[in-house]
Every structure is written in C-alpha cells, then in structure tokens.
Image: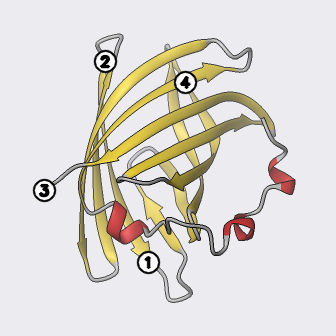
Amino acid sequence: MFASSSHRLEQYEGTMPEADIMTYFNGPIKAWGMVEDWRGRVVSRFDVEMVGKWEGDTGTLTEHFTYYSGEKQERIWTIKKLADGSYEGTAGDIIGKAKGAARGSAVRWNYVMNVPVGNTNYLIRFDDWMWQMNNGVMINRSYLKKFGFTVAELTLFMQKEKP
C-alpha cells in the first residue's frame, strides 16, 4: 500500500497508453474484482457487466454486479466532463459528487459511498486509481477509508468489449 499523500496524478503525465474516460467508458466492458479487508484477506469477489453511453460531455455508466455470494447489485453513474477537463459523477449510493481526472495512463476518482455491511450502512471514502493498459484492459485499485484509515482495498480488472 502506498501513502496517497505522496502519490499524485500528475506523476503519470505523458505515460502511455493514454487513459481517456469518455472513450474507454463508452460501450460494453466486462470486469472482475475482489475486496480485501485491512488484514489482506479476500472478503468478496464479483463480476461486473458495464455499458457506457455519452451524449456530448455527459455520460451514463450502468454497472451490473454479480457477487460470488449470489448477491446482485446495480449502480448507474451520471458522469459529466467539466470545462477544465476534470470530471464529476453521481450515483444513487454516492454521497455528494465524485470528482475525477485523467493524466497520461492514469485516472483518479474520489467519492464517498454509502456501503451496506450486514444490517448497517457505512459512509466509506473511496480513493480510486485506474491505469490504462494495452489491448483495452484497465486496472483499478481502490483504497476504502473510514476516519482516514484504509479499511479495505478493491482490485478490479476491466476489459473493453466490442460493441
């Protein structure tokens, strides 16, 4: 795990292949992920089917999660590209707005999500880092924080599909 205060998006300026949020999250994407608790134990695994659609500077990303436990979940993001080139997004379980930007091969998103765990909901801060790889692959590492402490980490591998 890295200290996020020393990890900056600008470090990836000029790296290739370049991550373009509007291009990558347009059309179908398949993904596979897992969540590790603070001890490094895998506590959840899941598959995701995503479809993104853009009209001008506004996109919709629909995510269908199928957890290995049998649970299913849907999240629909509305993402807007802002005049300064950054992005903001909203979804039903996101508190306020997600903020994001891309530089070179990297994308970073920050947001607070209302996460159900058993019979309780927790407000968890997500620090998402994504890296564009070759052949339509993107790798996402998310650091989930509560009271400033990392309580879990999420790893997601995405593969762009042909429409």
- Camera-side residue: 140 or 93? 140
Amino acid under label 3? Pro
Precedes in sequence: disc 2 or disc 4: 4
Precedes in sequence: disc 4 or disc 3: 4
**Crowd band around label 3 with a 10 angstrom C-alpha radius: few (<14), some (14–19), many (20+):** few
Precedes in sequence: disc 2 or disc 3: 2
As displayed, is residue 18 above or below residue 49? below
Image quarter (top left, top right, bottom left or bottom right) of the N terminus: top right
**Crowd band around label 1 with a 10 angstrom C-alpha radius: few (<14), some (14–19), many (20+):** some
Give the labeled residue for mark 2: 71
Q: Residue at x 75, y 32 (%)?
A: 150
- In the image, residue 15 lies at what x, y percent? 61, 68
Give the labeled residue for mark 1: 81
Amino acid under label 4? Val
- In the image, residue 119 lies at what x, y percent? 49, 15
- Camera-side residue: 73 or 138? 138
The alpha-carbon separation of the residues under discs 2 and 4 comes to: 15 Å
Amino acid under label 1? Lys
Give the labeled residue for mark 3: 163
As displayed, is residue 30 above or below residue 85? above
Per the image, label 4 sits on a secondary structure element best described as strand
Per the image, label 3 sits on a secondary structure element best described as loop
